[in-house]
Amino acid sequence: MVFEVFAIGSAFIFGLAARQVGLPPLVGFLAAGFFVNAVGPEFGMPATTGPILDYLANLGVLMLLFTIGLKLKLGQIAEPPVVGGALIHFGLSIVLFTPITRLFFVDDWTVALLVAIALGFSSTVLSAKMLEAKRELGNFHGRTAIGILIVQDIIALVVLAIFAGKLPGPWALLIFAMPLLRPVLFKILDSVGHDEVLVLTGLLLSLVIGGVGFELIGLKGEIGALVMGLLLSTHTRAKELSESLWSLKEVFLVGFFLSIGMSGLPDWNAIVFALVLGVLLPLKGVLFFFLMLAFRLRARTSFLAALSLTAYSEFGLIVAAGIPAAEPFIVPLAIAVSLSFLIAAPLNRIAHPLFERFENQLQRFELKTRRPDEQPKDLGDSNVIVFGMGRTGSAAYESLSKAGKLPVGLDADPYKAKAHADAGRNVIFADAEDSSFWSGVQLHRIEAAILAMDDIEAKLISVRTLRARGFSGPIISHALYADHVKRIREAGADQTYLTMHEAGRSLAAYAVDAMDVPLRD
């Protein structure tokens, strides 16, 4: 119990400290892991993670991958930038890291190859966490990055099977029958309600059926959790299920970052190894950037996706641990992974300002052709623009249409925009945080703007840019938290409403109408 108190207390202190200086809390959790590893033995505590923390960390990873699957679509994984980008980058990484590892750190080409393979992957946990924190998992660059990570995870399974001699048995073929479970899973999700049974359903699907179930048939539990999420991604309650698991997932992932930091204290050779890889880390992002440009993506999409993929992978540690020849490199790799997190996390936090700073230079590398992530220039005859077409934005769009207005909906999730368009609504794919969208779009017919997206930064950028473009019409925004109201108003919005507060006012108005009596003050 003393160890748990010490570990949780350290995670809280270091996580809070990281937040106070503008870093993601996960950077603090990593530092806490190193602190516990270094100081813990002096107080009679174990220096290594132990089975309990490892188990909690594994639960966090499984739940994270399950919730990622809930937000994905199968079709996006098969897109050329995803499959091609992942495979080519993996091959180039091996070509880059194998000779470096062989020349400076090992005498065996096979071991050098295995270490290079471990370094060829990008961090699923870090990328997903950063994209989720910025509410960009559904954006074009977010979906592209997550798709590449899924392909990399599949590659890792193949590598483990080849080098560790753990070829999946015939039972692994059952994975192709998984789509047959979808009707049953849908009925289960329809019947579980909205309380703790929904949370238990998520745990059952991600940890039991996805995690343990897939391991029983010879596949990795991480892939199982992801597949279970993908099977349910088209269900209307997929988002609700993901949100119900949010707190549990976050707590368990603290254990994951602690375990990375506690994986071992480095010797001098491990420190040198990690520093060299830290210097080489930018090459990982540069390769991704130019590969995605080669697949006709815009500079902005390529930059944001590449930056989110610029970290060495915790899955590389799993690969190294599962192959005896690479086991001596587990601690050096863990240090390198931790260092890459410390570098990548703050950079991802300021990804949008970074692109704006270097936009002119980066756009010179774009191919002169039509791109799949092209932004709209003309909003047609619309006179009201609605940013964010989730439940709030969709309700605003319908109300505007009934009032005789001509709304146009914009959403950064291409699948959501297409679903609205297929339903007959005037909704198009566009990212409010994209400066190229603002520089090209025509706003002369727009009389009012409604900001219905959840991300506070996207709202602030939209308000400021609208005013900078000379837009003088009313800007109306919703807000999830009271402290956001002042920030949005100061940015230039005319009116900002707390969503839950306005929902209560609307309920009271309906009650008054039903009673046909005036509402008392």
Image: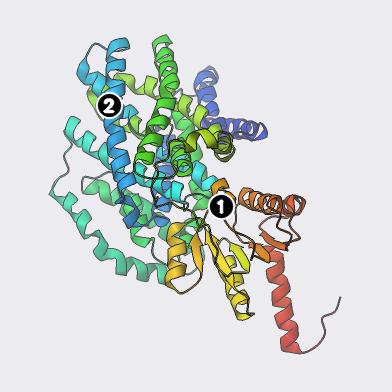
**Outermost residue toward the left?**
170
User: What is the distance, in whole Å, between disc 1 and disc 2 at their CAs?
Assistant: 40 Å
Picture layout, residue 304 above or below residue 454:
above
For residue 36, side relative to residue 91 (left or right): right
Q: Residue 146: x, y in percent? A: 40, 46
Which residue in the protein does label 1 denote? 440
Picture layout, residue 87 above or below residue 504:
above
Q: Looking at this view, is 94 or 193 the one in front?
A: 94
For residue 196, side relative to residue 177 (left or right): right
Q: Tell me what residue is drawn at x 52 percent, y 59 percent.
A: 411
Q: Residue 36: x, y in percent? A: 53, 24
Q: Residue 138: x, y in percent? A: 46, 53
Q: Amino acid at mark 1?
A: Gly
Q: Tell me what residue is drawn at x 43 percent, y 67 percent.
A: 419
Which residue in the protein does label 2 denote? 94
Colour scheme of the rendered structure? rainbow
Q: Amino acid at mark 2?
A: Ile
Q: Residues within 10 Å of mark 2 (few under 14, many from 20)?
A: many
